[in-house]
Image (cartoon, rainbow, N blue to C red):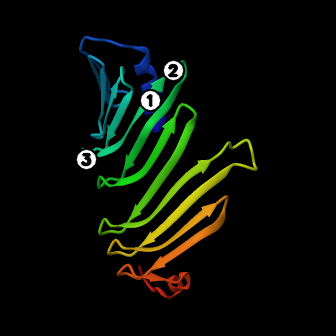
């Protein structure tokens, strides 16, 4: 379904209509309205997306009306994701954030949540150097686990899949040796 959304985005950038226009397509179960620079598509399940054909800003919503994703697509002879893209879960909490430039993805942050909406874990990834040069390229990955109360429990920083730093805390935030994490029964 996301492939359909991105296909629609490509079509939207080709057209730039200033008059309001409506298109109903019962076979695909969606309605599209073009008004000024906005192309708004509403689906039968209640989900919706809005594309600004001038600025490239894109937003989509779950059938419940909660924001699902937002970001920008730029067109400099070639269409690419640009700036910060945010993806939300059905509760409206940030689940994934990715930063892009014309050269591709720069970094990402992924978050999973406990049932109480506090973060369970998060992973931040970024790189340094030129990926074509194996001697200077460094891929960083920082994993953080949390207690249900929101306090960080442990953090591991990897560079090229090797652990370079480990930290651990008790549920009150007091620093502990990394071996402490093995003694925790539940977070």
- SS under mark 2: loop
User: In the displayed structure, would residue 159 be above or below residue 96?
Assistant: below
Say which residue appears at 71% left-offset and 49% top-offset: 136
Residue nearest the observer in this picture, 77 or 158: 158
Label 3, on which residue? 64
Q: CA distance from mark 1 to mark 2?
A: 10 Å
Circle 1: element type: strand
Q: Earlier in the sequence, mark 3 or mark 1?
A: 3
Location of residue 55 in the rendering, given as x and y in whole percent from the top left corner: 36, 24
Quadrant for residue 153, please give it. bottom left
Identify the residue at horizontal 62%, vertical 48% (top origin).
128
Please give the residue where the numbered disc 2 appears in the rendered image: 76
Residue indicated by mark 1? 73
Among the 4 quarters of the image, the one containing residue 146: bottom left
- Judge by depth and name the residue closer to the eye, 113 or 82: 82
The mark nearer the N terminus, 2 or 3, is: 3
The label nearer to you, 3 versus 1, is 1
């Amino acid at each position: 379904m996301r492939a359909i959304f991105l296909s629609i985005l490509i079509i939207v950038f080709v057209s730039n209509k200033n008059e309001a226009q409506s298109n109903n397509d019962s076979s695909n179960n969606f309605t599209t309205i073009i008004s000024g620079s906005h192309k708004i598509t509403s689906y039968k399940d209640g989900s919706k997306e809005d594309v600004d054909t001038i600025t490239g800003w894109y937003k989509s919503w779950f059938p419940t009306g909660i924001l699902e994703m937002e970001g920008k697509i730029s067109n400099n002879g070639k269409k690419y994701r640009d700036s910060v893209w945010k993806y939300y879960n059905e509760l409206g909490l940030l689940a994934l954030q990715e930063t892009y430039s014309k050269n591709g993805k720069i970094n990402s942050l992924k978050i999973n949540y406990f049932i109480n909406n506090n973060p369970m874990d998060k992973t931040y990834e970024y790189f340094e150097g030129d990926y074509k040069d194996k001697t200077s390229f460094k891929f960083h990955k920082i994993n953080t686990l949390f207690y249900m109360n929101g306090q960080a429990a442990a953090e591991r920083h990897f560079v090229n899949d090797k652990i370079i730093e480990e930290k651990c805390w008790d549920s009150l935030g007091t620093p502990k040796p990394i071996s402490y994490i093995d003694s925790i029964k539940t977070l």
